[in-house]
Amino acid sequence: MNTIVITILSLSLIGSLAAIILYFVAQKFKVIEDPRIDQVDEVLPGANCGGCGFPGCRGFAEACVNSEELADLFCPVGGNDCMSDVASVLGKDAVSKDPEVAVIRCSGSPEHRSQTNFYDGAVSCTVAHNLYAGDTGCQYGCFGCGDCVVVCDFDAIYMNEETKLPVVIDDACTACNACVEECPRDIIELRRKNKKDRKIFVSCVSMDKGGIAKKACSVACIGCKACLKVCPHDAITVENFLAYIDPVACKLCRKCVVVCPTDSILEINFPARKIKVEKENSAEEAVIKK
């Protein structure tokens, strides 16, 4: 009986000592969290997409609280309204940002880019990219495996069965950047969302020389610089045989679209161009009347 009592008392004493030690350790290393973090977290959308560059909404909330200003912090899902709420909670100034949308910079559908081989492996753009150059003559274009569709938490991308290319649903896109980070070919880009969602961009990322690029894909950019010469806003640069249109400098004049010999520059959500009818000269009219 004494052995049992001694055992119970010993275990109780050890447990009590352990509890006391744990209490003092917890007090020594406890972290006092700023209550404003919870307040900021409540006004965030809770998507935890990582588009802000932080691991989830709470990580972004902590960054907002600990930062002296919000100039370099932005929640792409919540947008300007969300950042205004965050600024109100923290008593800081919010910096508005133009809304952005993802664009697919590749038009290499089977119609324009013939298949040269067959890939029999894991249906993943990343895996395919690490194994070989692709199943067409273009080593830069979209694989069409749909990795971008898988990572999109907002159902803003789907694969077009005919073109074998991803399509962005502009109204659903939150510019979270997940698809941009996922694409191993870097064909997806976030661009400023203009009025009426109009945009002009070079839908090609090939850096092959003109003849090689054109042979691989009929709508590839050949780096001819025709667009560069007609742009009145210095919005176009050509490097490595590839043209690029700066979304900020571009004024959507569409002059570059007309002169592109391969139709690699896309104009989206613009009204149809008016067909100009040439007027007969007065001399011809006079002859017809006689």
Image (spheres, helix red, strand yellow):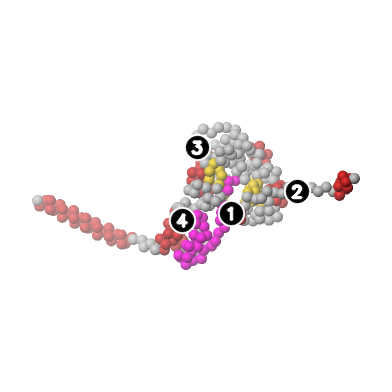
**Any part of residue 212 in sight:** no
Residues 270 and 132: in front is: 270
- The answer to which of marks 3 and 2 sits earlier in the sequence is 3
Disc marking residue 253: none
Tell me the distance, in whole angstroms, between the alpha carbons under discs 3 and 2: 48 Å
- In the image, the segment drawn in magenta is 76-105
Q: In the drawing, does residue 218 fall left or right of residue 151?
A: right
Disc 4 marks a residue whose amino acid type is Pro
Disc 3 marks a residue whose amino acid type is Val
- Which one is closest to the eye, mark 3 or mark 2? 2
In the figure, residue 212 lies in which quadrant?
top right
Tell me the distance, in whole angstroms, between the alpha carbons under discs 3 and 1: 32 Å
**Where is residue 171 shown, x and y percent of the image?**
55, 51
Q: Is residue 104 above or below residue 61?
A: above
**Do labels 3 and 2 touch, CB within 8 Å?**
no
**Where is residue 12 shown, x and y percent of the image?**
18, 55
- The residue where tag 2 is placed is 276
Tell me the distance, in whole angstroms, between the alpha carbons under discs 2 and 4: 50 Å
Disc 1 marks a residue whose amino acid type is Lys
- The residue where tag 4 is placed is 45
